[in-house]
Each structure stands twice: as structure tokens, then as C-alpha cells.
Image: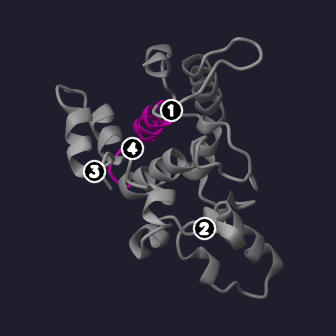
Amino acid sequence: RVFHSVHHVFDVSEGMSDPVPVLAAFFHDVIYYSIDGGLTPKQFNILSGIIQEDPGGVVRLRERFVLPGAQSRRHSGDHKSSMRDAQDQTDSLIDMIACIFDFKPGQVLNPFKGLNEFLSAACAVRCLRHYLPLKNLAAIAACIEATIPFRKPDEDGNTPPQLLYKQLKLANEKFEMEMTEVDVAM
């Protein structure tokens, strides 16, 4: 990598004092799928259960996000137990990130419309999930979403920051994050 290097991370985070945007800066370019030729084995393990790589290099979101390692676990023969286990293995944090990015299950991820940023946010949340509260993880994901380049207003004239605000507000309600209006507006 030439531009999206470790030096870039330090340049972006220089002068920041709030730990949430600093963490977002550290993670925002962790995944650079097309430049790196896919995922490293470590990235693949961290992101397991989120994407599927189709022939021809097409990357799409899975229909249901599962926790790493959940696909290989065996269920008992009890149908109710299997249903409960399947629900327990769903990764609601990745559902939250998809909501913030306004991505849908099964969606093809476009390398020019958020593929790298979404996977970087997913990597951040998976790596930090045991250390930070939900609203901080959502804020990190939102900061990373805001770095998607070259976007224009939608057909109704909403700018990318306005759309992100709406999606973060929706995610706050849907996932009961208890973010204040100030938190959502960041």
C-alpha cells in the first residue's frame, strides 16, 4: 500500500483527543480488499460469518451474520435447542453495523461504495466488542462509514452525513443503544 499505510493512520488521527474517533482512524483502512487482493488469513478469521466471496471476486453480505466459529458448531437433535442456538449465534453487532451503513443481507458489496469501510468497521467492532459499550462501537462504525469517499447527495438531496445521521438514529432505536441526541449527532 502506498496511500493507505500505517503513516496514513497517524496522519488522520493527529490532533484528535476523543478516543472514539482515534480508534475509528486506527481501523478505518484496516481492510483494503481490492488493493490487498482479498483478506489476509487473520482478517478472514475475524470477519468469518459476515461475507461470502463468490466466484469472480464478488463479495456479498451473508443472509444472516453469525459469530466467528458458529458455523462449525454442531447442534443437538432437539429442534427448540437448535433454534435457540442459531439465534444465540447471530452477531447482532454486525446487524447494527449493516443498519448504520444501510446495507441489506445478501447485498453485493461494491469496492467503490463502502466494501472496505464496512469490513473495516466490522473488524473494529469484532476486535473491540469485549472492551467498549455498544454506543461507542456504533460511534466507531459511524465514523468509519463517514470515510466512504466520492458520494453525492441522494435523489432527495440528502447528503451522506445527513443519511448517516438518519441511519445511526434508526440503529440507536432498533438496537436500544441509549445514545443521546448529542451522541447521534456526534
Q: Which mark is residue 49?
A: 2
Residue type indicated by callout 1: Pro
In the rendered view of the protein, which quadrant contains the C terminus? top left
From what the image shows, is residue 90 above or below residue 23? below
- Residue 128 vs residue 76: left or right? left
Q: Which span is picked out in magenta?
A: 130-146
Q: Nearer the viewer, residue 178 or 128?
A: 128
Residue 99, by quadrant, is top right
Q: Which mark is residue 5?
A: 3
Residue 138 visible in this rendered orientation of the protein: yes
Which residue was labeled with disc 1? 149
The earlier-in-sequence mark between 2 and 4 is 4
Q: Is residue 79 above or below residue 76?
A: above
User: Separation of disc 2 and disc 4 at Cα?
Assistant: 20 Å
Q: Earlier in the sequence, mark 3 or mark 1?
A: 3
Q: Nearer the viewer, mark 4 or mark 3?
A: 3
Q: In the image, which is nearer the foreground, mark 2 or mark 4?
A: 4
Element carrying mark 1: loop
Does any portion of residue 53 appear in the rendered image? no
The N terminus - image quarter: bottom left
Q: Amino acid at mark 2?
A: Gly
Q: Out of 44 and 91, give the one closest to the viewer.
A: 44
- Asked if the residue at tag 4 contacts the one at tag 2, i.e. Cβ–Cβ closer than 8 Å, the answer is no
